Image (cartoon, grey):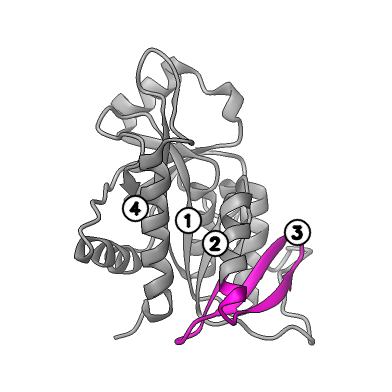
Amino acid sequence: MSTDSDEHIIIHPRRQKKEKPLPENGLLLVNPSEASECLGRLKQSGGVTRFLFNSGMVIAGDPLFFAAGPAIGAPMAVLTLEKLIALGAKRVILFGWCGAISPTLKVGDILVPAEALSGEGTSRYYCPDAVVRPDLNLSDQVIKVFVDKSISVHRDCVWSTDAVYREDQRMLKKLNLDEGVGAIDMEFSALCAVAKFRKIEFTAVLTVSDELWGDSWRPGFSKQIFIEKKQAALKQLLDHLGCFGEK
């Protein structure tokens, strides 16, 4: 599909008259449990709730930022990001989980992806390129925050899929060996494509929740190391979110 012009597009994301503009910086949380907990804490700290169709949103912080979610899967995540951009978002960080297909990644590792490879069906409507990349400047700012707090960061390629229950061991091994893919998720590549199309800054912070590179699936969702590391990463993002982009 051509993305050269919006001339023939029927429906466009818009800010309605009664909708207030957003702060430029924000966090988009993938998972319902994390989104609910994060938005709840921000609200308890004085944040203001805003309506966001099938998701949730809180405006918080000094300087201001927003947090929104959940947004599972490429289509839903793209719908949410499109609306956030229409409301004024300029810098968005995705916070989610990923499965490791490289033996160099273990449960609890923090990944700020260097590039994305599309295996989902949404990104082709925004960008014809199979490989897309997050914003380098925003990624570097996020990495610096983590490094300053002695949080190790990995920079692998992420492959996004629509079909979690159709992940073939042979296919994943080929993605790792031939394409340099280190991890998989469901949203990242599509959001990179939208960010490129809409010309906003976008990156992601993903915590490795499970390992798929061995002879069998090794889930780590309930492991203490996974819980502690993703919570530490989220805290650093929230502490610095309002300042990203400042010169």
Q: Tell me the residue that label 1 is attached to.
A: 95
The answer for how far apart the CA atoms under marks 4 and 2 are is 14 Å
Q: Tell me the residue that label 4 is attached to.
A: 112
What segment carries the magenta color? Answer: 42-67
Q: Tell me the residue that label 2 is attached to.
A: 28
Above or below, comparing residue 205 to residue 66 in the picture: above
Lower sequence index among marks 4 and 2: 2
Lower sequence index among marks 3 and 1: 3
CB-based contact (under 8 Å), mark 1 and mark 2: yes
Mark 4 or 1, closer to the camera = 1
For the image, the number of numbered tags is 4
Label 4 residue SS: loop
Lower sequence index among marks 4 and 3: 3
Inspect the image, locate mark 2, and give the three-letter code of the amino acid beneath it. Answer: Leu
Above or below, comparing residue 119 to residue 7 in the picture: above
Quarter of the view holding residue 205: bottom left
Residue 164 at x, y = what percent? 58, 30
Q: Is residue 147 visible?
A: yes
Residue 196 at x, y = what percent? 47, 62
Inspect the image, locate mark 4, and give the three-letter code of the amino acid beneath it. Answer: Val
Inspect the image, locate mark 3, and give the three-letter code of the amino acid beneath it. Answer: Asn
Q: Which residue: 57% across, 39% down?
A: 120
